[in-house]
Amino acid sequence: MAKLLLSGYYGFGNLGDEAILASTVEAIGRRAPGVDISVLSANPSETSVSHGIKAFNRMSPGGVVSAIRASDLVVFGGGSLLQDATSFRSLSYYIAFIYLTKVLGKPLVVYANGIGPLRSALGKRLTRAALLTAREITLRDPESESVLRELGVGIDAKVTVTADPAFLLTPAPPTRTREILASHGLDQERDIVWLALRGGQEDGFYRAVAEAVTLLRSEGFCPALLVMQERDVPVSEAVERSISSQGERPVPLVKGIRPAEALGLLEKGVFCFGMRLHTLILSAHAGVPFLGVDIDPKIGAFCRMVGNPALPDPRTGSSWDVAGDFRRFLNGRTGYEAELGKSVPALRAKAAENIDMILRVLYSSV
């Protein structure tokens, strides 16, 4: 039996990365049910239960070595792993992992990665050297390919631009979606607008989001908060308090869900306001137009790719008016939905190419 080891940012409660893992396990299981899949995780027990596969502790040197040795192919990614914007320590972990795989004599592929930003000269040199050890590389966006070209990687044909694996995710069953909506007092027959927030902005931005809730309600929409990562709970709760302080009734807050459930819920919305990349990816996958916030280069790049708008990053000093932007978005909503209809089918097809690549290299390695 061929054995795969998946390595990424798994087990940290980030719904976007868990969507990558869930869609990858699901897609490989459909295409090659005989493949034995395991994963490195920060929370092995939770990951094993959630995804039905064997999980190793990513911070246990002995566990990582055992997992690599037991595999026929190591799959590195997806997600934005090779970047030093979060910290150089994070980049160092992934570079060390790639070299450990090489030392142990196991083939490695880079899977649907978003590369960068790489700000340090050392980070660029280490990343280039590590990537040159990969059998094949797929990237989730053209901007990442540009980064690799600048590094001098991918001159040959081993680099391919595909799409994020989350485009392969299957939504939760309708009965489960209805159950979650009902438990939060949400009527699926209403025009639900999902607000998926993220911390790190000035208080004025979130006050403006609270004001936008009033606008949405006046237009007949039903706004609801969707938490994509545990660390986003405090800011969502703060916005909810701000809404209540203005004399408005509370906004439903949905948290603690799994990726397939998030996709099922987004499908029941009429549009989404999101501040995390995978909120927007899953919204696009659901065919639901969205308004993003360009707080990360990968968000702006994705919005441009699928023809949906993004507000400028408030931290840059750019002028913004959330309520006004919501109103303009509402006026153009049908056009943005049409743009998704044009671009998303091709992205789903490209996402499937990631699985083709894994299986091709796997079967050539066993």
Image: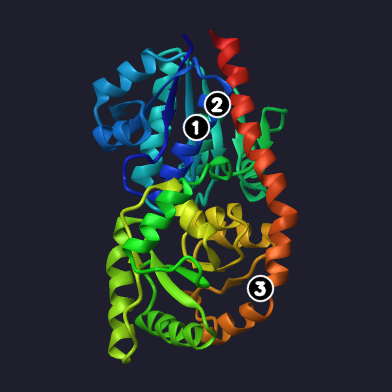
**Which amino acid type is shown beneath numbered disc 3?**
Arg
Numbered disc 1: secondary structure: helix
Task: Identify the residue at image location x=37%, y=39%.
Answer: 10
Task: Identify the residue at image location x=57%, y=27%.
Answer: 132
Q: Are the two marked residues, 1 and 3, in contact with CB atoms closer than 8 angstroms? A: no
- Image side of residue 292 versus residue 251, left or right: right
Task: Identify the residue at image location x=52%, y=83%.
Answer: 220
Mark 2, residue position:
30
Residue 163 occupies quadrant: top right
Numbered disc 2: secondary structure: helix
Which numbered tag is attached to residue 26? 1
**Which amino acid type is shown beneath numbered disc 1?**
Glu
Vertical side of 342 occupied by 293: above or below: below
Say which label, 3 or 2, has the lower sequence index. 2
Q: Position of residue 265 (x, y in %)?
A: 46, 57
Depth check: give the residue in front, 119 or 323.
323
Vertical side of 229 occupied by 106: above or below: above
**Which amino acid type is shown beneath numbered disc 2?**
Arg
The alpha-carbon separation of the residues under discs 2 and 1 comes to: 6 Å
> In this view of the protein, can residue 351 be seen by the observer?
yes
Vertical side of 97 occupied by 337: above or below: below
- Image side of residue 63 versus residue 185, left or right: left
- Image side of residue 316 versus residue 328, left or right: left
Mark 3, residue position:
333
Q: Position of residue 299 (x, y in %)?
A: 55, 60
> In this view of the protein, can residue 197 be seen by the observer?
no
Which numbered tag is attached to residue 147? none
The alpha-carbon separation of the residues under discs 3 and 2 comes to: 35 Å
* Direction bottom: furthest residue: 247
Q: Position of residue 31 (x, y in %)?
A: 58, 23
Q: Are the two marked residues, 2 and 1, in contact with CB atoms closer than 8 angstroms? A: yes
The alpha-carbon separation of the residues under discs 1 and 3 comes to: 32 Å
